[in-house]
Amino acid sequence: MVQHIKGVTVMVAEFVDIICKLRAADRFFTGAEAMAVFKGELSVSSVVEARARGLQDSDVDPANEDANIVSDRPLATGSGGTVYELARADGTHVIFKGETDSRTGLDSTAVGGGANFDPLQKTFNLNFASKKAAEALGMGGLIVRYSAGVHKGVFGFYMEKAKGATGREFVHGRASAADGLTAAEIKNLPPDESRRIKAEIKRELNRLQWLDLVTGQMDRHEDNYFIHVDRTTRQVTVKGIDNDAGYSQYRTGAMTFKFDEGRSNVFKSQLLATAQKIDPANAEALRQRYLEDPGITDNHDGTLTIDASRIADKTLAWALATTTGAQTLAIPDKIDSETCDALIALKGGEARQAYLDSIRPRLSEASYNAAVSRLDDTIAHAERLRAENKVVGTDEWADVQETPRGSGKLTARKLDNAEKRIGGDIAKEAHRAYSPSIYARDGFEKLFR
């Protein structure tokens, strides 16, 4: 009953929000849109939906209109509904995800939980904001292009179809010849060529990790980025997809989470569940010990601030990852020289203002404030690495030794034989979550030894 009332409340709020945006719009059609509608290149529904959501003129691409789509097929179905691959008349392919399905999927996972985002926050705007961050950092090609529109009466967003294979397919040898050069083929290339390609993959994954810090992306895993090595040119391309789990209002720093009272209680419950698995007879005392970890600050108002980069007992990884949905809880220990320069350029001046102005209309107030705080924290970390001479030049990535995955202190290791499986699960979670490198976390260091 409570969930039903909550759902009705959100629907009413969304309706009021749509009416306000329509009334606030300084025009309904631009001249170009009116002409496109007249020519049949753009549907009235696409314009209405865009205006109702306060989207910008450039967000809607006439190429996505149903009149230009010759076929569609379900690509994947999950908690976020069905994702479709659409073929356009010009031979290009795009991926379509309905806005309602996307938000439902986000809220049904730990990433959303109904609280990481304002109820009126649109997921297509989270994706578009991530694209703006990539452009501000000079890495616009690192994530897929987005546009909004209507497909068969459903409003949603269109994503460029990334070439290549997912990180998981690439590492585990499941990529096909059609996906570009496979890992096995790269290994068998002349040494200098193989070395250069491996270095570029390493560099691009590092850049993606820094972009994810700026956007607060919490759902970057082996299936959410693609790797393509062109068979002819040998050019390496990495593309991040599914960028709608960024800009959470909870993630206020590079690896800092500020939980309200409700989410703090969820985290404490997860800690207790962890403690009960490890030491059932003394679970409450163990949870209290966890809450005294250096990475956890009790704000004495029912809220917690957690700096994952300062967590001492990595057993907390399971509880923190489950509460936030974050796939990684570590900040990178190296940075590309171009990325470092681009980040520090966002410390102030016109570049910073341009980026903030580009994301401000797309985010709720809380998410925007968290984005500003997170940007400054990420810049500060980049400056620390520069001071420690940990900036890597573009031509130096081949010699970079990735930091092995290491979980550090683990209470779970103190389990007796009967509890080893539980300890193994927690240790595995900690190893993944606290790897400072996507490259190492996802097994590339073993692939390219």
Image (spheres, rainbow, N blue to C red):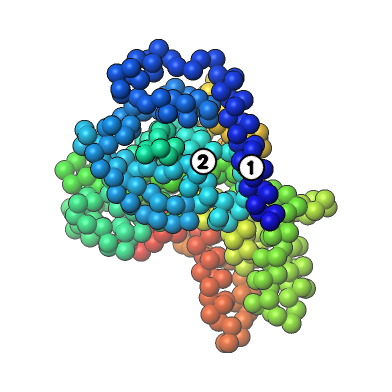
The amino acid type, in three-letter code, at marker 1 is Val
Is residue 405 visible in this depiction of the protein? Answer: yes
Residue at horizontal 22 percent and vertical 45 percent from the top:
230
Disc with the residue nearer the chain's start (1 vs 2): 1
Quarter of image, res 3:
bottom right
Looking at the rendering, in which quadrant would you find the N terminus?
bottom right
Residue at horizontal 55 percent and vertical 19 percent from the top:
25
Q: What residue sits right under mark 1 in the picture? A: 10
Image coordinates of residue 320 in percent, x first then y, are 62, 59
Looking at the rendering, in which quadrant would you find the C terminus?
bottom left
Position of 285 compared to 375: left or right? right
Above or below for 190 versus 348: below
Above or below for 303 versus 98: below
Q: Which residue of the protein is positioned furthest toward the top in this rendering? A: 31
Residue nearer the viewer, 404 or 129? 129
Q: Say whether marks 1 and 2 touch (CB < 8 Å).
A: no
Q: What residue sits right under mark 2 in the picture? A: 123
Is residue 130 visible in this depiction of the protein? Answer: no
Position of 407 compared to 373: left or right? left
SS for dot 2: helix
Image coordinates of residue 101 in percent, x first then y, are 48, 47
SS for dot 1: helix
Residue nearer the viewer, 322 or 349? 322
Specify few, some or many for label 1: CA neighbours under 10 Å numbering under 14, 14-19, or 20 or more.
Answer: some
Residue nearer the viewer, 445 or 168? 168
The amino acid type, in three-letter code, at marker 2 is Thr
Position of 122 compared to 64: left or right? right
Specify few, some or many for label 2: CA neighbours under 10 Å numbering under 14, 14-19, or 20 or more.
Answer: many
Residue at horizontal 22 percent and vertical 57 percent from the top:
176
